[in-house]
Amino acid sequence: MAQILIVDDSPTEIYAVRSVLEKLGHIIEIAENGEDGISKAKELKPDLILMDVVMPGMNGFQATRKISKDPEVAEIPIIMITSKDQETDRVWGLRQGAKAYLTKPVAEDELVEKVNSVLGA
């Protein structure tokens, strides 16, 4: 199964997403902000990153852009999972390098489908 890095500052969101993905056998790592997400992406080289947008310090758009432009980790796919539900936010997230954009609260089946799709499962 895949190693997945969840970058989110909400313990509730982390718990919800982690429980769904661990049931499928994925290994979950956590980063609580954008800066930590970037350093853990470089350290762990996960198969997938799930990125929140609204976080203290560096937001998810900025972290996604930095990861997508860094040759060391640019190949890691990113799915944004955020409460920002405007079409302009979705377009901007995809433009920063995200492969998919989901809005919270994300349905379990939608999350599983997107993760499997991005991982090529």
Image (spheres, rainbow, N blue to C red):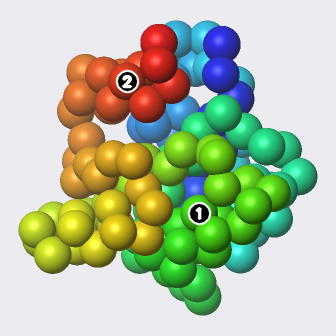
Sequence-wise, which precedes: disc 2 or disc 1?
1
Which residue type does callout 2 highlight? Ser
Few, some or many residues within 10 Å of mark 1 (<14, 14–19, 20+): some
State left or right for residue 49 relative to residue 51: right
Few, some or many residues within 10 Å of mark 2 (<14, 14–19, 20+): few
Which residue is label 2 attached to? 117
The location of residue 50, given as percent across then percent down, is 50, 48
The location of residue 89, given as percent across then percent down, is 22, 73
Q: Can the viewer see residue 34 in this picture? A: no
Residue sitting at the far front: 71
State left or right for residue 48 relative to residue 91: right
Vertical arrangement, residue 42 with respect to residue 79, above or below: below
Vertical arrangement, residue 61 with respect to residue 78, above or below: below
The residue sitting at 43% across, 70% down in the picture is 96
Element on which disc 1 rests: helix
State left or right for residue 120 relative to residue 7: left
The location of residue 37, given as percent across then percent down, is 69, 63
Q: Quadrant of residue 98?
A: bottom left
Element on which disc 2 rests: helix
Which residue type does callout 1 highlight? Ser
Q: Can the viewer see residue 50 in this picture? A: yes
Quadrant for the N terminus, please. top right
Vertical arrangement, residue 56 with respect to residue 81, above or below: below
Circles 2 and 1 in contact, beta carbons < 8 Å: no
Residue at mark 2 to residue at mark 1: CA–CA distance: 19 Å
Residue sitting at the far left: 87
The residue sitting at 80% across, 57% down in the picture is 72
The label on residue 68 is 1
The residue sitting at 25% across, 41% down in the picture is 106
Q: Quadrant of residue 107?
A: top left
The location of residue 116, given as percent across then percent down, is 42, 20
